Amino acid sequence: MTATVFAHCSLLDAARGQLLPDRHVLVEGAYIKEVSDRPLKTGQAVSLDLGGRTLMPGLCDAHVHVSAVEADFAKLDRLSPAYITARAARILREMLGRGFTTVRDAGGADWGLAQAVQEGLLAGPRLLYSGHALSRTGGHGDTRPRGEDRYPRPFLTVGTLARLCDGLTEVRRAVRDELRKGAHQIKIMASGGAASPNDPIAFVQFSPEEMRAIVGEAEDAQTYVMAHAYTPPAIKRALAAGVRSIEHGNLIDGEALDLLVEKRAFFVPTLVTYEMLMREGKESGFPPEQLVKVQELHAHALAALDAAQRKGARIAFGTDLIGPMHRHQSLEFALRRQVQKPAEVIQAATIRCAELFNLTGHIGVIAPGACADLLVVEGNPLEDLGLLQDQGSHLSLIMKAGQIFKNRLA
Ligand code: ZN
Ligand code: ZN
């Protein structure tokens, strides 16, 4: 078993929002074995003297689509799975290069992709996948143009990101089928969306009965449901059905926020995708007629995060980028910084994601028994979140599950 000692670290404690000076961390295999304020015996271990540099837990992103290699989902549906995988490989590798060691895929990634990462065939973050997101016919996952009458093939599946299901029997079958294929959590489309042609944002999608059936099936399998939802009616319906995380939530109001806090659900804003769609959507191939829907969402995104922060909601870090815009993932830190302190933003991307994923103590923390997902930062991100920008160039070391992906220290 390989062992590494990180000596003389300024250890970033996300929960306390502090750097703990002169700490020493022993990693054995894939896990953190010991954290001490005294020098550790190295023995067979490789010793890396950080000389006071920051050691922080690897970052988490609770909302990505690693297989959304095109910004136009109708186009995505016509690509070969092999080609999508090859392009997703690059997206995954670049995410890890930005310091993201765990990501939750909100639709598209499957067992094969997660397994390839797990086996080390592809470099990338640990992938918590939803399989196909569930959408009702004519919902956010239905990418067919209005002139199209055929039902999608094969087996109720639209392209790569979502599958269609209607009625209690079909939604139960869809959840069970995604869980059979190993989905870590279930994703539903609970309101209209921007990246789909036929559903205005105001649409509420899935009936209360369908949502409760979906949540019940997920809970029977010891997991949970994440819901794409923009408007108060959709958010409230999803929360009432027992959904664990509200994704985006741009148009959330006070009443829906109160319910979210009361239910101890999680809020996963994805500011950067609206920002980038406004800036680069057109040249990235996002359909212009859908871009109109983005404007309203973009206008409200920051205020929704601000309101959630003031109400004490449990806020996790998400990005939701698609196509060529993936490279702007870390801009989410800067956008959130407008209404949150750096420590709050870092908490969202570490301990809060861990809670949301039911992985508290395993990821997002530097403590004995946790996965050895570690970043060495040239500076203090609690003072300067900009250190997490620039494609990982301020990270001199990136380790995931004890494996070094990048090391500039030597
Ligand atoms: Zn969404
Ligand atoms: Zn999404």
Image (cartoon, rainbow, N blue to C red):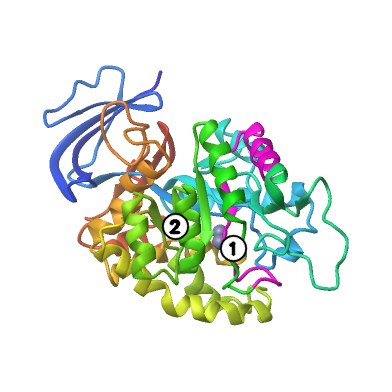
Tally of numbered tags: 2
Q: Secondary structure at mark 2?
A: loop
Which of the 4 image quadrants contains residue 335?
bottom left
Give left or right: position of 78 versus 103: right
Q: Which mark is residue 318?
A: 2
Identify which residue is drawn at 65% across, 73% down.
286
Q: Nearer the viewer, residue 379 or 177?
A: 177
Picture coordinates of residue 265, whole percent (x, y) = 38, 50
Q: Amino acid at mark 2?
A: Gly
Q: CA distance from mark 2 to mark 1?
A: 13 Å
- Image quarter (top left, top right, bottom left or bottom right) of the C terminus: top left
Identify which residue is drawn at 24% across, 65% down.
310
Which of the 4 image quadrants contains residue 387?
bottom left
Q: Amino acid at mark 1?
A: Ile
172 magenta-colored: yes
Q: Which mark is residue 408?
A: none
Q: Nearer the viewer, residue 382 or 266?
A: 266
Picture coordinates of residue 152, whole percent (x, y) = 82, 55
The answer to whether mark 1 is within 8 Å of ligand 2 is yes
